[in-house]
Image (spheres, rainbow, N blue to C red):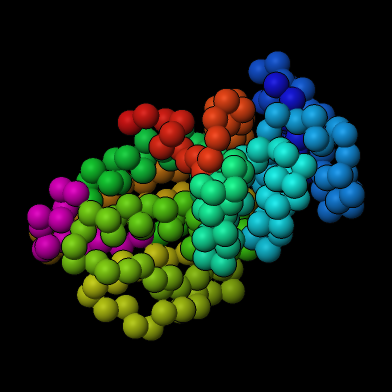
Amino acid sequence: MKIALIGYGKMGRMIEQIALSRGHEIVSIIDIDNQQDFDSDAFRSADVAIEFTAPHVAYDNYLKAWEQGVKVVSGSTGWLKDHGDEVRKACSEGGKTLFWASNFSLGVAIFSAVNRYLAKIMNQFDAYDVTMSETHHIHKLDAPSGTAITLAEGILDEIDRKGRWALSGVTTSEGRKATDKQISDDVLPIEAIREGEVPGIHSVTYDSEADRIVITHDAHSRKGFALGAVLAAEYTAGHQGLLTTSDLFKF
């Protein structure tokens, strides 16, 4: 399979290594300094483009890739609120293809399934209050993480006593900054922590007077994310529309 890379940071380089090890060909690498290469025969020859960039440029990258007739796999987060409707319409009515996930790790896909199942159980036991936390490296721009939002939405789908999620605070080396001061009983709070080079830790806690239940996913490296992205590209090459990890991983 021919793959183009959009974004060539740590994730892009790791994806390149894994793609090559699985017998794929990297036909184009696009980064900040060669945006003109979107309009090139090399990029157009790709079966799929894998995109890991920043929230403020991701959507434009999708448009540029689609304009060249190239399907996209993306792990960029932070764009959904502003451009989610346009992307859904482009995929459902415009014939475009995007495989998007806030996290491509197989472990996170399993964790997400467990999270939903546990929330379904805990909907019956209102003595337990649910909170979340996520920890990432200091370079991460968005908070809470896209994975945390996806997990929170899974909880909200199952627990009737929670109506929305809110970022309750961000903790860095400089201290903690509270963000949403209106954390009422019907709000699912998410605490964001930024420290060191942490790839990603997500925890969901159910606490009561009697006891506490905690589930956690702790990524040891970015390798699981990169492998998942390549697996998603292999899947996307033969499928169309707006795709997610629930299409790739059947739990």
Q: Nearer the viewer, residue 216 or 7?
A: 7
Locate residue 60 relative to residue 208 in the image: left or right. right
Q: Nearer the viewer, residue 233 or 139?
A: 233
Q: Is residue 40 left or right of residue 210?
A: right
Quadrant where the C terminus sits is top left
Which quadrant would residue 17 be assigned to in this image?
top right
Which residue is outermost to the front?
Answer: 93
Quick check: 177 left or right of 75? left
Residue at 86% in and 44% down? 39
For the record, the magenta segment spans 120-132
Q: Where does the image place residue 12, in percent across and percent down from the top left?
A: 72, 40
**Picture residue at 88% right of the left edge, 34% below the top:** 41
Question: Where is the N terminus found, in terms of image quarters?
Answer: top right
Residue 65 point in image, percent of width and height:
73, 45
Q: Residue at x 66, y 38 (%)?
A: 71
Residue 161 at what x, y percent from top left?
Answer: 18, 66
Going by the picture, which residue comes out furthest to the bottom? Answer: 181
**Relative height, residue 28 to residue 94 (above, below):** above
| Closest to the observer, 10 or 207 | 10
